[in-house]
Image (cartoon, rainbow, N blue to C red):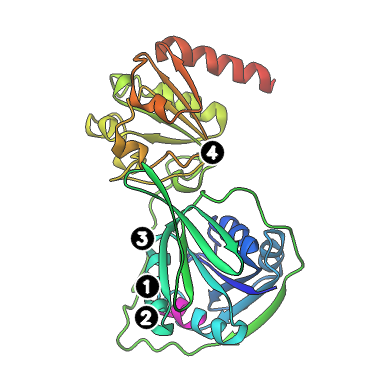
Amino acid sequence: MSNVLALIEVSHRGEMAASARGLLAAAATLGSPVAVVVSAAPLADDDVAWLGELGAVRVYAALTAAAGTVLVAPAVDALGAAIDAYSPVAVLTANSVDGREAAGRLAVRVGGSVLADVVQVRSDNGTVVARHSVFGGAYTVDSVVEGGLPILTIRQGAIEGQAPSATAAVDEAFLDTPSEGAAVIDGFNDDAVVSARPELRTAATVVSGGRGLGSPENFALVEQLADTLGAAVGASRAAVDAGYVAQTAQVGQTGVSVSPQLYVALGISGAIQHRAGMQTAKTIVAINKDEDAPIFEVADFGIVGDIFTVVPKLIEAVKARSN
């Protein structure tokens, strides 16, 4: 099978990003997944085994002293070297800040083309076809690269399933990434961990609240349902602007785009700006007292009713089922 490279992001603490699962699943639909990992030290056996469980047939471990000290450039160097080693039919990165930056730089370096914010991939007679959700989610379009190497940034959470597990073989390479002319990282300031809930962008389940909650105190209902379902907490822009919750929870065109397995919208009318950030979710459940709310146009299941009556009963039912 043809090789497909997947750039696995690694934090400064050495933790591999949760986006690895979706990237390797997407790579497996196009060919043989090769995980590209950039680090300053050899990969631990557990990390290699984890990548194999997620479907990586090979792991290209690019070792460089610049990992964690030079911004993005080591990843681009590693991808360039991996392209020479494996002659892939496509390169995949996460649609994150670093992933988009690496994709753009790599395209310039190798004469490739970037297909950004991809929600689904397939191979059509050897041609890589990328699917996008565009114009606020109003349209779904397919795109292909007619010249050069396809380089795709994959929306986190958008790819369903997981690639078949494999026993990954490791190929080590030693790279010398110069710091001259590159942005050098002087230090890291981690955000304080304030919640044990899943991270919003990569969560499998998201519960979001809107203006219909009425107050910051009432927004606790969203958090209660989220904790019952083991979900991340999101919000509409209206709820954020009203001060119900922090801006980091905002889902939509000017916030975070999510593609969870389950998205529950509580008291959200469903303006197009909000739908643009969530309507690629696999299953959408909406609860709103306004039967004409636009959110019902994209919902798989809709409940017309008072969220303060419906949601407590839903929480009780979920708890009873889990017991």
Q: Which mark is residue 282?
A: 4
Helix, strand or loop under label 4: loop
Q: Earlier in the sequence, mark 2 or mark 3?
A: 2
Q: Quadrant of the N terminus?
A: bottom right
Helix, strand or loop under label 2: helix
Q: Picture coordinates of residue 144 (x, y %)?
A: 46, 65
Q: Earlier in the sequence, mark 4 or mark 1?
A: 1
Residue positioned 71% across, 59% down in the render: 53
Q: Which mark is residue 104?
A: 1
- Distance (Cα) linking label 4 and label 1: 29 Å
- Contact, mark 2 vs mark 3 (Cβ under 8 Å): no
233 in the magenta segment = no
Question: Which range is magenta?
Answer: 73-78
Helix, strand or loop under label 1: helix
Label 2 crowd (10 A; few <14 / some 14-19 / many >=20):
few
Residue farthest left in this picture: 241
Residue marked by disc 3: 189
Q: Picture coordinates of residue 290 (x, y %)?
A: 34, 15
The amino acid at mark 2 is: Val
- Distance (Cα) linking label 1 and label 3: 26 Å
Residue positioned 28% across, 19% down in the render: 214
- Contact, mark 1 vs mark 3 (Cβ under 8 Å): no
Residue 95 lies left or right of residue 212; in this view the side is right
- Distance (Cα) linking label 3 and label 4: 34 Å
Question: Which picture quadrant has residue 270?
Answer: top left
Q: Please identify the dominant SS of the magenta region.
A: helix
- Distance (Cα) linking label 2 and label 1: 7 Å
- Contact, mark 2 vs mark 1 (Cβ under 8 Å): yes
Residue marked by disc 2: 108
The amino acid at mark 1 is: Gly
